[in-house]
Image (tube, rainbow, N blue to C red):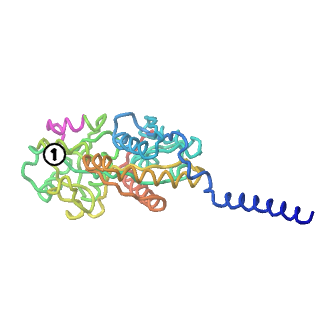
Amino acid sequence: MKNIHTSVDRRDWLKWAMAAGAASAAPSWAQSTWPGKPVTLIVPFPAGGGTDAFARPLSAQFSKLTGKQLIIDNKGGAGGTLGANVAAKSAPDGYNFFMGAVHHTIAPFMYSKLDYDLERDLVPLILVANVPQVLVVNPKKFQNADFKAFLDMLKKNPGQFNYGSAGGGTSHHLAGELFKLQTKTFITHIPYRGAGPALQDLMAGNVDMMFDGLGSSATHIKSGRIKAMMVSGNKRNAAFPDVPCSTELGLPDYTVSTWYGIWAPKGTPTDAQARMVEEVRRACQADDAKAVWAGQGADFPNLTGAQFDAFIKKELTKWSQVVKASGAKLD
């Protein structure tokens, strides 16, 4: 009987040991199975906009790599703040994410009240695209002037030149205000209902210049209908190597870009956050995605977690100062 009990006890111990080993080896929150179902990416602008231009290719690559669909859910309205509010209040179950943009670091200072807090309610995961702003002018207005001559004309004729934008409070508008602050010039702001109409009037000569995302201006620069005077940042853009960057022109702090990143609702499991970052990074580094990014003059910054958070804080500080100096406000 003693031997029988010993044998039984040994079998029970082995079962317990195997179960305990399996439990300790299993990744927390079923990491190996994520995503186990389609993932939703809330895009806070209408379909066909600038955010969509990166979200859709990203979705295609994510779905190809993971075998699960990344569903784009467009929630446009109120300059992107409506969709941000929806994302902030969505279930933090590891299957809801948010693709925001530079506008979301401007909004807290443009609107007197928001129903969400970017830093409190959303967790920054990864910065996926960065499109530099470019200063473009009507070539007939400035003929063969280089940047120095162009700047001299602005300084000698305050208020005599104007710039178009996609509307009050947009990154186009505030890029112009930042330029004015840093160059100590005065240019009249002409807001339009979108970047498209502003570009059309620039090409027609109805406005003198525009601070635009390189992606939407690229075709018109190449055709010669508008002229690029400066691309923002500390390096020239590979698609336009002849256009000087702001740093080499004496404006080292003029780093304006239209950027796009991904956040998770606060409370999302950390394993799901980590896997989302991993899969988004793989998707952005796929050849098809690289071709799309390059075609729009964009790069993939690959800033994640604390790095992306630090980037956001820097953008918030910058835009708060620009909004305050410009006096712009929306309700």
Q: Position of residue 165 (x, y in %)?
A: 28, 41
Q: Residue at x 16, y 56 (%)?
A: 243
Residue nearest the observer in this picture, 165 or 289: 289
Q: Position of residue 218 (x, y in %)?
A: 20, 45
* Residue 176 visible to an observer of this rendering: no
Relative placement, left or right, of 61 versus 35 is: left
Q: Residue at x 17, y 37 (%)?
A: 206
Relative placement, left or right, of 225 versus 116 is: left
Q: Amino acid at mark 1?
A: Ile
Residue furthest to the right in view is 1
Image quarter (top left, top right, bottom left or bottom right) of the N terminus? bottom right
Q: Quadrant of residue 303?
A: bottom left
* Residue 269 visible to an observer of this rendering: yes
Q: Position of residue 32 (x, y in %)?
A: 56, 52
**Magenta span of residues:** 197-207
Relative placement, left or right, of 106 versus 268 is: left
Total marks shown come to 1
Residue nearest the observer in this picture, 110 or 275: 275
Q: Position of residue 26 (x, y in %)?
A: 63, 57
Q: Residue at x 19, y 47 (%)?
A: 136
Residue to which mark 1 is pinned: 221
Relative placement, left or right, of 320 versus 92 is: left
Q: Main secondary structure of the magenta part?
A: helix
Residue furthest to the left in view is 144
